[in-house]
Image (spheres, grey):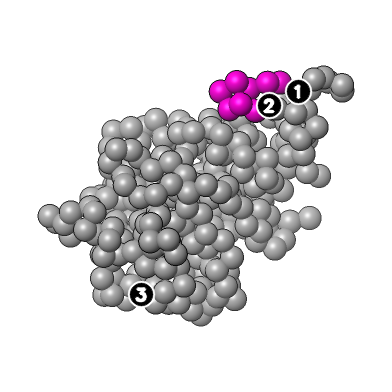
């Protein structure tokens, strides 16, 4: 049995990466929670704490804003989550790894102030984004609420990522976005498609102008839009998700019919996948269906 999860998705413009930006962010988190006191999971868009000023060069900002996850910024974020007793996803940040490379990374902080997950963007938007690619699929458990997977922006265009997260048991996939371009229309469709073909909740959270064009959206495991923001300025989307519904849909089928996690008859051979030099093994595929 799960407890419904109250989420808050803050569609807003980015904060500058200077120290004053962290002060403003903390004040904003306090304001949002004061206005929506029931929210348990609060999330912000991609690179929300690593914003630009007019005329700043991308690589210069990336270098200036990058720090280890356990640096001063991470310490403040952990304290903020603990102070407000919330699950906090502060958007993604520029992370300077131990090997010196810079990643676009989404950290997650629990109500106890612990960093419980960090996801490095696997597919930077080449050639425009120069961060190093991550190599791990990441999910985290929220106690009796359910399991959440993480993706960042362009990752949503690659069905393998959301499929892996669903296979790892994610009930909800949180996609942090910073899209200022016209292809946001396609990303909205992808949020619905990823929800449908993986039978998982999808929350695609985009930035507001000038960093993004909004249109954040939450989709249920059968592809129905639950809430959607407009293309305007800041907007806070709230919803209460019973994440066990994702597991029910996988068992009973979309609209009571389609069971994408159980397409194989007993004894069928594995399906070879030349593109990946791998295969779909029926036994491993079925692992995704949890009671």
Q: Quadrant of residue 15?
A: bottom left
Is 18 a magenta residue?
Answer: no
Image quadrant where one finds the C terminus? top right
Q: Quadrant of residue 231?
A: top left
Q: Nearer the viewer, mark 2 or mark 3?
A: 2
Q: Can residue 238 be seen in this view?
A: no
**For the residue labelled by badge 2, is the local secondary structure a helix, a strand or a loop?**
strand
Question: Along the polypeptide, which appears first: circle 2 or circle 3?
Answer: 3
Question: Along the polypeptide, which appears first: circle 1 or circle 3?
Answer: 3
User: Which residue does the numbered mark 1 point to in the structure image?
Assistant: 270
**For the residue labelled by badge 1, is the local secondary structure a helix, a strand or a loop?**
loop
Question: Along the polypeptide, which appears first: circle 2 or circle 1?
Answer: 1
Q: Which of marks 1 and 3 is in front?
A: 1
Assess whether mark 1 and mark 2 are in contact (beta carbons under 8 angstroms): yes
User: Which residue does the numbered mark 2 point to in the structure image?
Assistant: 279
Residue 7 lies left or right of residue 98; in this view the side is right
Q: How far apart are marks 1 and 3 (CA)?
A: 53 Å
Assess whether mark 3 and mark 2 are in contact (beta carbons under 8 angstroms): no
Image x and y of residue 77, in percent: 45, 72
Pointer 1: residues within 10 angstroms few (<14), some, or many (20+)?
Answer: some
- Out of 222 and 89, give the one closest to the viewer: 89
Q: Please tell me which residue is depicted at 56% across the width and 23% down the height of the picture.
A: 275
**For the residue labelled by badge 3, is the local secondary structure a helix, a strand or a loop?**
helix
Image quadrant where one finds the N terminus? bottom right
Is 275 a magenta residue?
Answer: yes
- Out of 12 and 105, give the one closest to the viewer: 105
Residue 78 lies left or right of residue 20; in this view the side is right
Image x and y of residue 182, in percent: 28, 33
Q: In which quarter of the image is residue 44?
A: bottom left
User: Which residue does the numbered mark 3 point to in the structure image?
Assistant: 27
């Amino acid at each position: 049995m799960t407890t419904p999860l109250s989420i808050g998705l803050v569609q807003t413009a980015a904060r500058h990466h200077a120290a004053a930006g962290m002060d403003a962010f903390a004040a904003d988190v306090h304001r949002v929670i004061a206005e929506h006191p029931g929210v348990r999971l609060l999330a912000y868009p991609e690179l929300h704490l690593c914003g630009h000023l007019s005329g700043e060069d991308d690589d210069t900002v990336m270098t200036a804003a990058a720090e280890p996850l356990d640096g001063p910024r991470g310490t403040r974020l952990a304290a903020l989550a603990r102070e407000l007793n919330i699950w906090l996803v502060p958007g993604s940040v520029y992370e300077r790894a131990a090997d010196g490379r810079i990643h676009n990374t989404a950290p997650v902080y629990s109500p106890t102030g612990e960093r419980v997950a960090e996801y490095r963007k696997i597919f930077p938007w080449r050639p425009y984004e120069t961060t190093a690619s991550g190599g791990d699929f990441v999910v985290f458990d929220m106690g009796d609420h359910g399991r959440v997977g993480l993706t960042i922006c362009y990752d949503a265009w690659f069905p393998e990522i959301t499929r892996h997260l669903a296979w790892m048991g994610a009930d909800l996939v949180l996609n942090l976005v910073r899209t200022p371009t016209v292809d946001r229309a396609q990303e909205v469709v992808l949020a619905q498609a990823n929800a449908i073909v993986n039978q998982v909740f999808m929350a695609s959270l985009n930035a507001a102008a000038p960093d993004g064009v909004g249109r954040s959206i939450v989709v249920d495991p059968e592809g129905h839009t639950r809430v959607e923001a407009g293309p305007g300025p800041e907007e806070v989307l709230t919803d209460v998700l019973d994440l066990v519904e994702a597991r029910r849909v996988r068992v009973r089928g979309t609209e009571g019919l389609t069971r994408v996690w159980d397409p194989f008859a007993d004894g069928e051979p594995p399906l070879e996948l030349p593109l990946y030099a791998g295969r779909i093994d029926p036994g491993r595929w079925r692992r995704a269906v949890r009671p």
